[in-house]
Image (cartoon, rainbow, N blue to C red):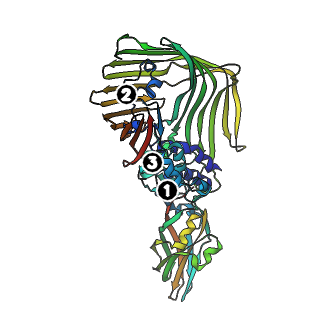
Amino acid sequence: MRPGVVALALAVLVAAPARPARAQFSFDARRIGMGGVSLTRDGNLRRYNPAYRAVKDRPGSGNPKATIPVPLGLIQFFHDHPINKFGSDPLFDPKSPTFNPFETMNLVFSLPIFLEVKKAPTPTNDVTFTVGRNAFVLDLGAAQILVPEDDFGLGGTSRLLDVGFGIKGFRFGVQGFENHDVGFLLGDSLRAFLKNADSARTNTTYNVLGDGIVQAGVAPTLSFSGRVTGVGSDNQDGVYLGVAVRSYYGAAYFRAVGSGGFTTGDTLFAGPNPVTPQLEALTYRDNDATKSFGQGIGGDVGVVFISGPMEVGVGANDIAAELTWKDTRVDSSYFATAGDSIVTSTVRNHVQSKTKMPVSYIANASIHMGTGTTVGGDIVNSGRGTVIHVGGEQRLGMLALRGGVSRDQRKKMQFGFGGGLRLGPIGLDVGFWTHSNSFADKRGITMATSISLY
Amino acid sequence: MKATAAAFVALAALLSAACGEGRAIFNVDVYSFIRGSGNDTIPYAIPPLSAGTVSNSPRQINLPPGFGSSIVDSVHITGTASLVNTAGTGTIGFRLYLDSTSAGTLNASALAIDIPPTGVSGTNTSPLVITGDLSAALRTLFTASSLWVRMAATGNNAGATPVTGKMALTALQVRVVLQDKIF
């Protein structure tokens, strides 16, 4: 049971940094072929920069009405893993001798929508254990690079719904929001054990520090987006401004801060000296959403500058958004060695606590040349790490050629290229995207295909 | 031992599984577990014109759990012992027996290492080098959660006076290489 607890607690931390950078950022083969950048005024631009809501699509920019992914990867997947054999498939059967939980976890994180035309070679790596009565050294070799030295995790903010009405640039609406963020940090002893092949020691705690939050609610929003210069001209040149003031009404939140792991005994490998599980956590939660909301004020701001073929934009969301929860319960949980169980008690109740919404932002630039060439790039931070995309498209009649590069959240460069064929209202696009494993330079290639309706 | 090993191995398994089809290599310092327990020394007393074998009691060694599905590529044993002879002239060898049960180590089929005899004489200390690879049949023992070990000293006395002394183990390491399927 105990190693199971340890494995479960650490599965997330190991999986997160080890996850290959093949998670698809879009179902649109055009974006994938340009390294992830979007050269049209949609998607991330209107999501993160409120000024773009006042900017119409560029004439002839090729914004499709809909994009439908062609899931060739699913065909390949179900060919390799027939549905009627899922029960005995080693990918899903933990009892199988070839079951690998990381492959299963990777499948969840990276759904095989698109076709893998070249798989990233899996690096092989020997792991050496040195075991003595009072020594335990684990040398992970090249895999040490997988061990995160800093805080790591996952998180983001979503707008679950957005209904409202507007007039003359002003808009009043109600948005649903959701924010989640889970961060981990290896304890010093555990990090030295894994990262530096330091010997395990007696009477030492090996743990992971964690901090996670999830909060959700609704936010009535008053926004304005409009053109502030060049009004009345017959082109789109000018400066566009977007602002939004949002009153947050949090319906629920839960936060947990603490550490978990195990503590070694007097002797590492002798006698009945089981390791002792270690768990200490404080949890915060609102008591009753029907009685009080978590309230706060925040806003978005964005600006777009367009001059002929060039445009530049900057936008940020959830600025200064701090929610105050007036009725919060704080619980303490810890592992009690006496009863070999987790003990939970309320340490404070009906107290006030505060949470923050992370600021997300985007900066973008593009230039549309008269030769059918469009190039652009963007920098996006949706709450955890910055991603950079740079790409371009060359149109040649019905054909389009695309290419681009990206630097992902792990600061690895990836490359995209592709093309498209447009036949009247229908376009067929294909994009190739490189990806790699965490500590290997060799890349695999995913082929994305999609149909666009214009 | 199991719980400590299990915790660390579970942790290590997560990382090693994440980095592809590598091998897990265990360097186990067996001597550190038996040093000072009495099991690291085998006294011998061989009457004149005879041969014989003496051994210590079988000892159980716990192994890191969870390797039941693994394939053991190789098991290499290295070590040293001192033959502390106090009287007589003869030869002393070393044998190591491994089995899944205590009684099984008494069987001839459990013989894992057989070091040829080394000559001893008078009051003298002679080094004995222990090295060898396990057969495929015995390698499978390392996929279990424990195994039993018995050490024996084999002696031959062609002289007219008894050969007495002790074989003192000074190092014993086991290197196990396996294709890990820890889960």
Task: Indicate whether A387 appears above or below A311.
Answer: below
Pointer 2: what residue?
A61
Image mark for residue A115: 3
Residue A227 in the image: state x and y as whole percent: 40, 13
Q: Nearer the viewer, mark 3 or mark 1?
A: 3
Q: Position of residue A360 (x, y in %)?
A: 47, 25
- Tally the numbered discs: 3
Between discs 3 and 2, the one toward the N terminus: 2
Determine the image quadrant of residue A35: top left
As measured in the structure, the alpha-carbon distance from the residue carrying label 1 to the one carrying label 2 is 59 Å
Foreground tag (1 vs 2):
2
Question: Which is in the foreground here, disc 3 or disc 2?
Answer: 2
Q: To which quarter of the image does residue A296 belong?
A: top right
In the picture of the structure, the residue carrying the numbered disc 1 is A129
Q: Which mark is residue A177?
A: none
Q: Amino acid at mark 2?
A: Ser
Q: Are marks 3 and 1 in contact (CB under 8 Å)?
A: no
Q: Position of residue A141 (x, y in %)?
A: 42, 52
Q: Neighbour class for label 1 at 10 Å: few (<14), some, many (≥20)?
A: many
Which callout, 1 or 2, points at the residue further toward the start of the chain? 2
Residue nearest the viewer, comparing B174 with A219: A219
